[in-house]
Image: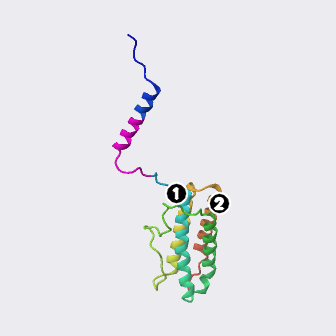
Amino acid sequence: MRPRSLTRRAVLAGGAAAAAVTACSTSGSPRPSPVTEPPEQVLLRTLIADKERTVALYSSLVAAGHDALAPFRDRHQAHLDELRKHRRPATPSAKPTTPSPSQPTPTATPKTSLPKLRDLERRSAAQRTRQLADASPALAQLIASIGACEAAHVLALPRSL
C-alpha cells in the first residue's frame, strides 16, 4: 500500500488553521512596537531644557536690574537657538521637553547670588564633557563649544552686582 501524500489544498488549510489557533491564543490586540527616540534626540531635549532654565534665570536677574548679566543671558540664548536647529520634530511617543528631575528649575530670588551662578555654570560645563559620548561629531562640536563658553562664564561673571 502506498503512503498517502498531502495535497496542496490540505497543506494550505492546515496552515490557515494553525494561524487561526495562534492568533486566538494571544491575549488582546497586537500592540505596535514602541517608537523610541534616538539617543541624540534625547540628549538634545535635555540640553534644550537645561538652556531654557538657564536663560530664564539670567532673564529674571536682568529684569531685576542686573544689566551686567545681559551679555551672559544673550550667549545662553544663542546656544539655545543653535540647539533647537538640531532638534528633529517630535515623534508621537516622544516625551515633551521637561526639566530634569535632578535639576530643579532655577528662579531668581534674593538668594540667587553670583557664587550660585558660577556654580551653575561650572556644573553645566562639567556636564557637557560627559554628554559628548552620545553626540554625532557636529553636535559634539557644538556641545564642546557651549561647555567652553560656560567655563569662561565662571571666570567672567562680575564679582558683585
For label 2, count other residues whose C-alpha is less than 10 Å away and answer few (under 14), some (14-19) or many (20+): few
The percent position of residue 23, horizontal first and vertical second, equals 38, 43
Q: Does the segment drawn in magenta span residue 22? A: yes
Within 10 Å of the Cα at label 1, are there few (<14), some (14-19), or many (20+) other Cα atoms?
some
Q: Is residue 49 visible?
A: yes
- Residue at image position (45%, 24%) is 7
Q: Amino acid at mark 1?
A: Glu
Residue 46, x across and y down, in percent: 52, 65
Q: Residue at x 56, y 76 (%)?
A: 55
Label 2, secondary structure: give it. helix
Mark 1 or 2, nearer chain start? 1
Q: Nearer the viewer, residue 100 or 11?
A: 11
Q: Which residues are magenta?
A: 16-31
| Circle 1 residue | 37
Q: Amino acid at mark 2?
A: Gln
> Where residue 144 is drawn, which disc sits there?
none
Residue 126 seen in this snapshot? no
Q: Nearer the viewer, residue 6 or 52?
A: 6
Q: For the stretch drawn in magenta, what is the main secondary structure?
A: helix
Label placed on residue 141:
2
In the shown orientation, is residue 27 left or right of residue 32?
Answer: left
Q: Position of residue 137 (x, y in %)?
A: 64, 55
User: Picture coordinates of residue 157 (x, y %)?
Assistant: 59, 78
